Image (cartoon, rainbow, N blue to C red):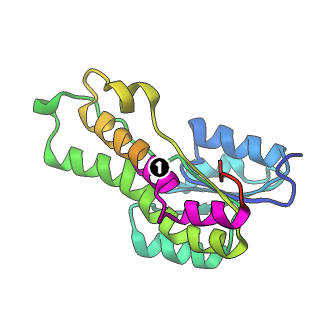
């Protein structure tokens, strides 16, 4: 029960890593707000102890901000939403590129901006951003847009955590210990 009395938001909790993480956090005692754009797939989490479900389109800034305002302060934000575009640069159109960047990276930017003020106000919180070690560091064959967007997630996360002007650095100074 390591997460007893903690409130978590998990994006893309309808399947895969997002669903497994939402279930694990709930088993460990957290109250989990499992979100996804697909309410039919989220139905599998309904009735699971400690899990509440909500439709959330992380591609829509106004929707993310409204959800954060309604949800209130959370202890854990797990950004898991993502899309894997398959193809080389010649097979990746601008729409494919834009969608990959928007869902895989900008959605994380949106949710952090929406939930971080509450974490700062309570002087604690954890943000987990799903990336891909193989794709973001090395690049993967036929996954140009995916690799580039996940590399952006990696750098966004590192920049947020290490910048002396970042909210995490401020939070660390307040707590007098590293936030990770």
The structure residue drawn at horizontal position 31% and vertical position 23%, both measured from the top left corner, is: 140
The structure residue drawn at horizontal position 60% and vertical position 48%, both measured from the top left corner, is: 13
**Of the pair 140 and 126, the residue shown nearer to us:** 126
x, y (%) of residue 145? Answer: 26, 38
- Left or right placement of residue 139 versus residue 16 in this view: left
x, y (%) of residue 170? Answer: 58, 66
The structure residue drawn at horizontal position 19% and vertical position 49%, both measured from the top left corner, is: 95
The structure residue drawn at horizontal position 71% and vertical position 54%, both measured from the top left corner, is: 177
**Of the pair 111 and 99, the residue shown nearer to us:** 111
Q: Choose top left, top right, bottom left or bottom right for residue 16.
A: top right
**Number of other residues with Cα within 10 Å of mark 1, as a class: few under 14, some 14 to 19, many 20 or more:** some
**For residue 108: magenta?**
no
x, y (%) of residue 125? Answer: 68, 60
- Left or right placement of residue 157 versus residue 11 in this view: left
**Of the pair 102 and 37, the residue shown nearer to us:** 102
Q: Which residue is mark 1?
A: 157
As displayed, is residue 111 above or below residue 117?
A: above
Count of number-bearing discs: 1
- Left or right placement of residue 151 versus residue 68 in this view: left
Q: Choose top left, top right, bottom left or bottom right for residue 136.
A: top left
Label 1, secondary structure: give it.
helix
As displayed, is residue 9 above or below residue 84?
A: below
x, y (%) of residue 159? Answer: 43, 52
As displayed, is residue 2 above or below residue 169?
A: above
**For residue 160: magenta?**
yes
**Of the pair 158 and 65, the residue shown nearer to us:** 158
Give the main secondary structure, helix, strand or loop, of the magenta stretch.
helix
In this picture, which residue range is highlighted in magenta? 156-175
């Amino acid at each position: 029960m390591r997460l007893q009395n903690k409130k978590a938001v998990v994006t893309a909790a309808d399947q895969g890593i997002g669903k497994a993480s939402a279930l694990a956090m709930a088993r460990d005692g957290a109250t989990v707000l499992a979100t996804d754009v697909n309410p039919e797939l989220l139905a599998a989490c309904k009735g699971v102890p400690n899990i509440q479900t909500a439709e959330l389109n992380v591609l829509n800034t106004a929707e993310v901000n409204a959800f954060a305002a309604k949800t209130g302060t959370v202890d854990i934000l797990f950004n898991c939403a993502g899309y894997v575009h398959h193809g080389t640069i010649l097979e990746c159109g601008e729409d494919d590129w834009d969608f990959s960047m928007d869902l895989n990276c900008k959605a994380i930017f949106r949710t952090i901006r929406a939930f971080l003020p509450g974490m700062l106000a309570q002087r604690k919180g954890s943000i987990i951003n799903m990336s891909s070690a193989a794709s973001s560091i090395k690049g993967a064959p036929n996954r140009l847009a995916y690799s580039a967007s996940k590399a952006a997630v990696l750098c966004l996360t590192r920049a947020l955590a290490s910048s002396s002007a970042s909210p995490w650095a401020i939070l660390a100074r307040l707590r007098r210990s590293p936030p990770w």
